[in-house]
Image (cartoon, coloured by chain):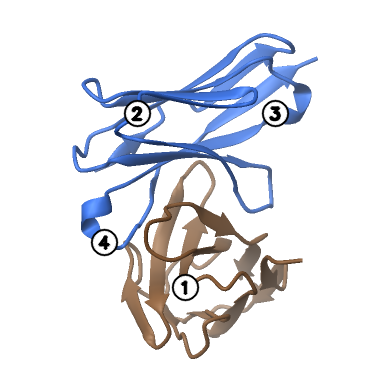
Chain colours: A blue, B brown
Amino acid sequence: DQQVKQNSPSLSVQEGRISILNCDYTNSMFDYFLWYKKYPAEGPTFLISISSIKDKNEDGRFTVFLNKSAKHLSLHIVPSQPGDSAVYFCAASASGAGSYQLTFGKGTKLSVIP
Amino acid sequence: DGGITQSPKYLFRKEGQNVTLSCEQNLNHDAMYWYRQDPGQGLRLIYYSQIVNDFQKGDIAEGYSVSREKKESFPLTVTSAQKNPTAFYLCASRMTSGFYEQYFGPGTRLTVT
């Protein structure tokens, strides 16, 4: 049973517009969430994270929003650039587990069209 | 430069052979992880280690083995018991407790025929 779901396998956005990537989770014990960006045949790179005590975290063009009641988070990229074209993974962790393991979604492939 | 290295980038083996994938980090991170990625799938945890000489199974440990004799190194052996070994393997590491972010190596693409 998938505990972290990214229901959109792909997303296409025009350069300069906003990209919104969504992620849903089912495990109420998750209290820390991360977004990773991955290019083909490379390792994922950490983008941004958010703790469950916050509902928003911003870093440059990237903003993550967390809606705990809906068990939903989203990554906003503004403005989108062609170099943002990659697969984006949402990940979640439960601090109470003590192991800091991450549970990943299946990813959303973002294509930014020039 | 600090980072995680995985070698080789591409690895080819015949079915029935064991193969060991290398993962080395010089970030002084305590915890290390092995993941597998298949097309259209997320990252699935194979094994992880939080301290030297200790490791735990992840979600898909069957057919794999690991060792953690040094803090810097966490090799993964894909045994002949692994039914579908062809995949992209990723190693990651994390700082001490309190930090969630894992940092990944470049990956090894293993093809078994």
Frontmost of labels 2 and 1 is 2
Q: Chain of mark 1?
A: B
Residue that appears at 49% across and 36% down: A107
Q: Confirm or deny contact between disc 4 and disc 1 (CB under 8 A).
A: no
Q: Residues within 10 Å of mark 3 (few under 14, many from 20)?
A: some
- Could you give the CA–CA distance between mark 2 and mark 1, rounded to whole angstroms? 27 Å
- Amino acid marked by disc 2: Lys
Q: Residues within 10 Å of mark 4 (few under 14, many from 20)?
A: few
Q: Find residue B36 and report its horizontal and vertical position in percent.
A: 49, 59
Q: Nearer the viewer, residue A7 or A77?
A: A77
Residue that numbered label 3 is attached to: A84
- Amino acid marked by disc 1: Asp
Frontmost of labels 3 and 1 is 1
Q: Find residue A26 and report its horizontal and vertical position in percent.
A: 23, 34
Which mark, residue A98?
A: 4
Residue that numbered label 1 is attached to: B30
Q: Confirm or deny contact between disc 3 and disc 2 (CB under 8 A).
A: no
- Could you give the CA–CA distance between mark 4 and mark 1, rounded to whole angstroms? 14 Å
How many numbered discs sit on the rendered protein? 4
| Above or below, comparing residue B104 to residue A75 in the picture | below
Kindly tell me whether residue A106 is visible in this rendering.
no
| Above or below, comparing residue A80 to residue B6 in the picture | above
Q: Earlier in the sequence, mark 4 or mark 3?
A: 3
In-image side of A85 versus A31 (left or right): right
Q: Earlier in the sequence, mark 4 or mark 2?
A: 2
Residue that appears at 51% across and 41% down: B40
- Could you give the CA–CA distance between mark 3 and mark 1, rounded to whole angstroms? 31 Å
- Could you give the CA–CA distance between mark 4 and mark 2, rounded to whole angstroms? 21 Å
Residue that numbered label 2 is attached to: A54
Frontmost of labels 4 and 3 is 4
Residue that appears at 70% across and 66% down: B2
Frontmost of labels 3 and 2 is 2
